Image (cartoon, rainbow, N blue to C red):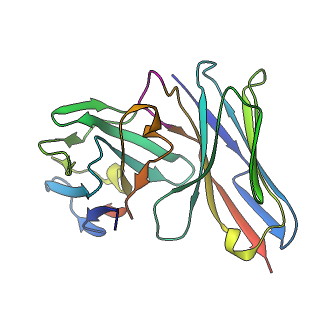
Amino acid sequence: EAQVTQNPRYLITVTGKKLTVTCSQNMNHEYMSWYRQDPGLGLRQIYYSMNVEVTDKGDVPEGYKVSRKEKRNFPLILESPSPNQTSLYFCASSPPGLAWTDTQYFGPGTRLTVL
Amino acid sequence: GENVEQHPSTLSVQEGDSAVIKCTYSDSASNYFPWYKQELGKGPQLIIDIRSNVGEKKDQRIAVTLNKTAKHFSLHITETQPEDSAVYFCAATRMDSSYKLIFGSGTRLLVRP
């Protein structure tokens, strides 16, 4: 089954404790992206990657890091989480070219709470 | 950069009635406008999209219209059903030069049985 998986689905942590949210897709997609969803703000793009070892900032990259060492995985790293990073996070993937938006698959989401 | 505004934030309709959600965008170069439906506990799912070279697109009970001059586009759902209840997001991007998808703030649609 074609899917995007995220782990963990729920996480409660404390300020300053480094964490990683994993994202994996089994569709051999080149494009992957991270979004955060906050009430009243919709989804905002954090980082995206057009291929292995190619990443770029989205609209709200501050406080986040990503890496793309393999095509299937695109982890989101919070080196020193702060309460304003409490949010619902989504990973997405899609094939390259002009179809990158109309075939974008979203993961189930990770709800992160930073105390 | 692009900015997308979406209205209303909440919408309650009686089953069988129509629902309309409107979005405006700021970047006249944007040429692709998808709509996503997000059900509780799930990620967004594309339900319909429109490119800037057409003014309207329909898929069964769902339609999207685009007014490039006014820079706004709308989602129309006819004969609403309880299973249409969800959060709907519009988005905009330039397909040929950007990999950034800019979302609206979302509309929570409630269809009352």
Residue A48 drawn in magenta: no
Residue B88 in the figure: left or right of residue A95: right
Residue positioned most to the bottom = B113
Residue at position x 68%, y 69% from top? B85
Q: Can residue B92 be seen in this view?
A: yes
Q: Which of these two is toward me, B94 or A99?
A: A99
User: In the figure, residue B24 lies in which quadrant?
Assistant: top right
Residue drawn at x 73%, y 37% is B73
Viewer-closest of B58 and A37:
B58
Image coords of residue A69 (percent x, y):
11, 42
Note whether A21 is above or below B69 in the view shown: below
Q: Is residue A69 above or below residue B60?
A: above
Highlighted magenta segment, given as a residue range: B96-101
Which secondary structure is most common in the magenta stretch? loop
Residue B100 lies in magenta, yes or no? yes
Looking at the rendering, in which quadrant would you find the C terminus of chain A? bottom left
Residue A53 image offset from top left, x and y in percent: 15, 33
Question: Which residue lies at the image location 30% right of the left edge and 54% below the top edge?
Answer: A27
Identified at 47% across, 70% down, the residue is B41
The x and y percentages for residue A90 are 38, 54
